[in-house]
Image (spheres, rainbow, N blue to C red):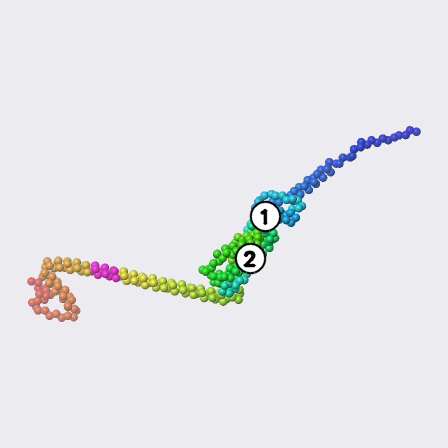
């Protein structure tokens, strides 16, 4: 009986992992690394601040446009606007110096000047606007409370232009004093209304004032008209008087020249001159109903009957 022994050979090396499995692992690690990198990259735009916090504390504020990185897991990034913002201030009721009540509607244009101070003291944009609103209302009430009602609403007497600048300056002083990190660019009053119960009486008074002003203008216009008419009449009379004087001088000069010519002409034939003067005297003395009795031998009678010899 013969025994048959089977021999199995073993080389002692471990089996190799498939290449596909290794590729998948490397791809997964690459994706994870890429996601980590992208999740910690942030972009700063031109009109914004990027606030980087680490465990809640501000470590830096990026404001120059560009690409930035943060430390993974321990740092976070928030955004604050860098551009100017518009805030519509709540309507406020104030009393003027002459004890009139008015309703004010105004607005403010503001911006973040120091993001770190804003976050530390105001914490949020809403709180910053709330503080700004309080300061604006307080200063507006104090400033307008020193003016009479007419000085506020009357365009001719109004000082609202300079008042807006004063309010803006004083609000900024308070914000800077409390280090809120924001700056008010401009505060403007856009509307002034009256409480409903006062509207009609004020409107009537305004109408009366306007009518009085209109009557004043009419009176001034009428007075000016009378002054112009009187001046024109005086100038016309002076012109007529000068013209009349000139006419008299011209007439006198003409009469003088005519007399000279008559004298010069009649001196050449005195008898004809006497005859002409006689005819002229008859023209003045004898009328339509005048009866003249002349001697038959008078020269004039001879002339009438045609006896010229």
Q: Residue at x 16, y 66 (%)?
A: 284
Q: For this rendering, which residue is in front, 44 or 219? A: 44
User: Which numbered dot is residue 49?
Assistant: 1
Q: For this rendering, which residue is in front, 146 or 289? A: 146
10 Å crowding of disc 2: few (<14), some (14-19), many (20+): some
Say which residue label 2 marks: 135
Which secondary structure type mostly characterizes the magenta part of the structure?
helix
Q: Residue at x 30, y 62 (%)?
A: 234
The quadrant in which residue 244 appears is bottom left
Give the structural element (helix, strand or loop) at label 2.
Answer: helix
Q: Residue furthest front?
A: 177
Q: Is residue 292 left or right of residue 245?
A: left
Q: Residue at x 8, y 65 (%)?
A: 299
**In x, y percent, where is residue 165?**
50, 55
Residue 4 vertical placement versus 46 (above, below): above
Q: Is residue 65 left or right of residue 242?
A: right
Tell whether position 246 is magenta: yes
**In x, y percent, where is residue 68?**
61, 43
Magenta region, residue range: 241-251
Q: Residue furthest top?
A: 2
């Amino acid at each position: 009986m013969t025994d048959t022994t089977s021999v199995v050979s073993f080389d002692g090396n471990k089996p190799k992992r498939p290449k596909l499995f290794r590729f998948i692992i490397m791809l997964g690690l690459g994706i994870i690394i890429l996601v980590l990198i992208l999740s910690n990259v942030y972009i700063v735009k031109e009109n914004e601040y990027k606030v980087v916090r680490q465990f809640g504390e501000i470590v830096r504020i990026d404001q120059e446009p560009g690409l930035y990185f943060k430390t993974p897991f321990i740092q976070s990034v928030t955004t604050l606007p860098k551009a100017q913002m518009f805030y519509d201030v709540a309507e406020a009721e104030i009393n003027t110096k002459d004890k009139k009540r008015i309703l004010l509607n105004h607005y403010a244009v503001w911006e973040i000047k120091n993001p770190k101070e804003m976050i530390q003291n105001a914490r949020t944009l809403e709180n910053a606007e709330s503080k700004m609103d309080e300061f604006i209302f307080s200063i507006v009430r104090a400033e307008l409370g020193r003016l009479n009602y007419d000085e506020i609403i009357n365009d001719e007497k109004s000082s609202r232009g300079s008042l807006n600048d004063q309010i803006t300056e004083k609000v900024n002083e308070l914000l800077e004093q409390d280090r809120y990190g924001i700056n008010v660019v401009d505060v403007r009053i856009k509307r002034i209304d009256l409480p409903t119960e006062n509207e009609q009486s004020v409107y009537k008074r305004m109408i009366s004032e306007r009518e009085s002003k209109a009557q004043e203008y009419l009176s001034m216009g009428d007075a000016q008209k009378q002054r112009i008419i009187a001046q024109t009449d005086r100038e016309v009379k002076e012109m007529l008087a000068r013209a009349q004087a000139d006419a008299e001088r011209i007439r006198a000069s003409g009469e003088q020249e005519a007399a000279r010519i008559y004298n010069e002409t009649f001196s050449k034939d005195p008898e004809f001159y006497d005859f002409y003067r006689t005819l002229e005297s008859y023209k003045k003395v004898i009328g339509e109903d005048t009866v003249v009795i002349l001697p038959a031998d008078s020269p004039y009678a001879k002339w009438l009957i045609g006896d010229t010899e």
